[in-house]
Image (cartoon, rainbow, N blue to C red):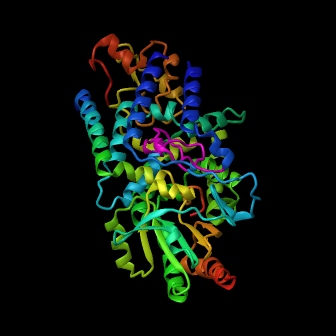
Amino acid sequence: MSLKRKYIQVISALLYNANFKGFAEGKIYQGKIKNVCVPGLNCYSCPGAVGACPLGSFQNAIYSSGKTIPFYIVGTLLLLGVIFGRVICGFLCPFGLIQELIYKIPSPKIKKNKVTKALSKLKYVILVVFVFVLSAIKEYPAFCKYICPAGTIEGGIPLALGNPSIAAMLGTLFTWKSIVLCIIVIGAVFIYRDFCRFICPLGAIYSFFNKIAFMGVCVDETKCDNCGRCIRECKMDVSHVGDMECIQCGECKAKCHKNAIMSKREFYKRNGELKNEKVQ
Amino acid sequence: MMNVKYVRSFILVLGVAFIIAGVMNGSMSAVFNKAIRICLECIGIG
Amino acid sequence: MKKFSKVAVLFAVVCLSLSACGNSNKNNATDTNQSQVEEDNASGETGTVKEGEAAPDITFTLMDGTEKKLSDYQGKPVVMNFWATWCKPCVGEMPAFEKLKENYGEDITVLALDCGGDTKEAIEDFVSENGYTFEFAEISEDEASKYDVQGIPLTIMIDADGVVKYINMGASDADSMYNDVYEPAVKEMLGNK
């Protein structure tokens, strides 16, 4: 039931941002829990944020590790990736939730097509160019600085509203980031999860784990008749259920007329390990 | 086609090992130190 | 729901154990009478530290290992900067402090407190690479929290009597910071002696 998924999305968004008084005071949380990264995209400069952002932390590690090998953030991403894969995108990312809510606004919708499929590769380019190369060269978190809408909407705006000294500092960069945020937010009305599909480097990172992750959705090949309905009706740019574009939301389960789609856990329970799992 | 079961278990162990190594070598502190300061660049000021 | 609860509990346990291993920061260790103090304009406050109030005393360690307190420097105005080697704007504005030291060094103290978890070696390398001559020190998170360092760079200008005169968070380039912010503030503190 997608209501359960919404519920989990909302609960996790609230948990990641449990420092509610931060919003009132215009200040960020500085306590111990910030040793831990939350799984989804959630700016650590958000006044409510109680954990670190995995993507921001990763960029910091790229340019400022010095002689310290960034085991911690890499280990975090490996662990989260292998356990959840893009279940994080589908269930545990506040910005994913925001986009889904915006999409509910009634409007003509732009369905996925060859163009969006091609655009879905863009997030890997952004991963390489902004997260890796630019951050390393310029020695600042380049994706955070120039693109991340989560930073603008969760960090910049609440802090500027609650903290006059920060509001006084806003300049051209903030204008640029606000434009980027507007484009993404307006786009999300017409295009399902435009940020997730085309831009998010964190989703790009987790996508590499999707097929091997413990959790997720899979197809029982013995039941599947290759009608392709699941792929057609999926709003992401998938080629197969559970591939790199799949955010593991599970909405395809109800669409399958053969009941061939199930969670990996359910699959193992029924069939023993990996016997019929489609691994492309 | 790789045996998925072994790859995922290996990465799980590797991830945990790296996290433990990270706690010990200070890379977790590095994450903490940056997370508790307002990243002016992240919020569009820097 | 059962699966989610299990995962949520596991996640919470992992988080709690990790944060038990990690650093901590005491929020707002000393609370001043905020209700009585008027809200100053724009860059007036940083949590528990406000312009016009006494500067909280803090302890830090100089590069030669000596422990010092802020109060040790009372008698002359102090320009106190919270920074870290990984903070690009912090590093970018440092020459402004060197210039302050050059031009006003007899009459003021310039102090750079690394609150970003840098190792002593990293700070020493930074200082020698850039040839800075003003005072550098390491400060612990607990001590820095007395100034509620929300963001860096954070510069506190304290007059000779230990009263906070001016607070500035963030920095553009060194020249603008020197000309528009630091030098005027220092001149004012020296002029009013």
Residue B1 in sight in this render: no
Check the image and report above or below for C180 versus C2.
below
The answer to whether C62 appears left or right of A236 in the picture is: left
Q: Main secondary structure of the magenta part?
A: loop
Q: Is residue A34 magenta?
A: yes
Residue C163 in sight in this render: yes
| Image coords of residue C29 (percent x, y) | 56, 50
Name the quarter where the N terminus of chain A is drawn: top right
| Image coords of residue A134 (percent x, y) | 43, 62
The answer to whether C157 appears left or right of C116 in the picture is: right
Q: Is residue C29 magenta?
A: no
Q: What residue appears at the point 62 percent right and 73 percent down from the top-left corner?
A: C161
Q: What residue appears at the point 56 percent right and 37 percent down from the top-left corner?
A: A94
Check the image and report above or below for C7 versus A209.
above
Q: Which residues are magenta?
A: A26-52
Check the image and report above or below for A47 versus C114.
above
Residue A108: which quarter of the image? top right
| Image coords of residue A82 (percent x, y) | 34, 34
Name the quarter where the C terminus of chain A is drawn: top left
Work out whether residue C48 or residue A33 is closer to the camera in this orientation and state it: C48
| Image coords of residue A81 (percent x, y) | 37, 36
The answer to whether C180 appears left or right of C27 in the picture is: right
Check the image and report above or below for A130 versus B13.
below
Work out whether residue C11 or residue A131 is closer to the camera in this orientation and state it: C11
